[in-house]
């Protein structure tokens, strides 16, 4: 019996989106269950040691195993599922890709500060940190269209949800983060067209993210023209 996969999710979580994109790229069937992270169900807390999403529940003949942490989940998907390969075959290149996946997580940490702070100075500090990090990304990019060239990889699955935030932010104000980064801008545009990326969130994602900003009294909203 092939393992059945159940992904425990939250509608806004960028880490969940990584796993959803990887599963879609490989054409893998899975069940997605969205939960409210402000009111976590008891059954979820029993299977998620960190109380975070995503959690991938893998059911085999031997029983259920709950995998947590998005990069671990993506690696499991890559190693066990058929379809296109999302990691390089070369060990050194593969390690390099894993490092850039971690860099994506560092960008998300700055993004969290940018979108939740109520303080103008903190906001500008996070904005500048994001400019610096994306400048490093610009230097790492080749001729595109994806991170490693023609083939879509797990690094692309990590960065697509990052760029999605800016689709909403751009409607509020121009942050200037990608202004001098043509390769990053081109990469962002290419990822936005990818079917796996488009379908990783619901149609209500922009409204939900805006509501999140309102709840946090985000400084970002005060910059609206």
Image: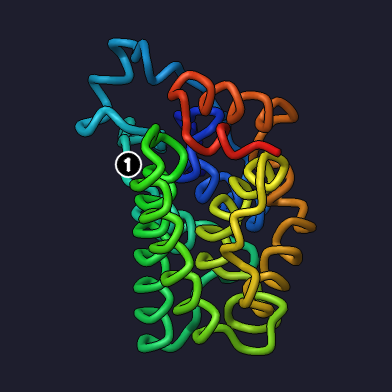
Pick the residue in front: 203 or 219. Answer: 219
Pick the residue in front: 24 or 204. Answer: 204
- Left or right: where does residue 85 sit relative to residue 137? right
Pick the residue in front: 126 or 154. Answer: 126
- Left or right: where does residue 36 sit relative to residue 181? left
Pick the residue in front: 208 or 210. Answer: 210
Q: Position of residue 128 (x, y in %)?
A: 42, 63
- Left or right: where does residue 182 sit relative to residue 3? right
In this picture, is 84 found above or below 167?
Answer: below
Q: Position of residue 88 (x, y in %)?
A: 50, 81
Corner quadrant of residue 130: bottom left
Q: Position of residue 150 (x, y in %)?
A: 70, 81
In this picture, is 130 found above or below 119?
Answer: below
Residue visible at 37% across and 71% down in the picture: 98
In this picture, is 117 found above or below 87?
Answer: above
- Left or right: where does residue 68 sit relative to residue 133? left
- Neighbor class of circle 1 (other Cα within 10 Å; few <14, some 14-19, many 20+) is some
Q: Which residue is mark 1?
A: 67
Color scheme of the displayed model? rainbow
Number of marks present in the image shown: 1
Corner quadrant of residue 190: bottom right
Residue visible at 77% across and 52% down in the picture: 195
Q: Position of residue 14 (x, y in %)?
A: 50, 44
Residue visible at 37% across and 86% down in the picture: 91
Please indicate, yes or no, whether residue 60 appears anywhere in the rendered image. Answer: no
Where disc 1 sits, the SS reads strand
In this picture, is 25 found above or below 119?
Answer: below
Q: Which quadrant would the C terminus be assigned to in this image?
A: top right
Q: Which residue appears farthest toward the left when viewing the image? A: 49
Please indicate, yes or no, whether residue 207 appears anywhere in the rendered image. Answer: yes
């Amino acid at each position: 019996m092939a393992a059945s996969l159940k992904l425990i999710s939250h509608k806004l979580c960028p880490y969940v989106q990584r796993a959803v994109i990887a599963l879609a790229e490989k054409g893998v069937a899975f069940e997605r269950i969205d939960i409210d992270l402000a009111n976590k169900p008891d059954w979820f807390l029993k299977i998620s040691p960190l109380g975070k999403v995503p959690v991938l529940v893998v059911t085999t003949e031997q029983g259920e195993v709950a995998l947590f942490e998005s990069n671990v989940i993506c690696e499991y998907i890559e190693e066990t599922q058929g379809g296109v390969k999302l990691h390089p075959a070369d060990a050194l290149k593969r390690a390099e890709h894993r490092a850039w996946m971690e860099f994506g997580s560092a960008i998300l940490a700055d993004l969290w500060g940018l979108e939740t702070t109520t303080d103008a100075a903190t906001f500008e500090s996070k904005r500048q940190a994001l400019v610096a990090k994306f400048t490093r990304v610009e230097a790492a990019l080749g001729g595109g269209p994806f991170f490693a060239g023609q083939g879509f990889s797990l690094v692309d699955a990590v960065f697509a949800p990052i760029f999605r935030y800016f689709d909403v932010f751009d409607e509020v104000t121009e942050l200037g983060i990608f202004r001098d980064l043509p390769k990053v801008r081109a990469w962002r545009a290419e990822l936005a067209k990818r079917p796996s990326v488009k379908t990783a969130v619901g149609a209500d994602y922009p409204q939900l993210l805006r509501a999140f900003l309102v709840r946090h009294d985000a400084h970002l909203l005060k910059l609206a023209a």
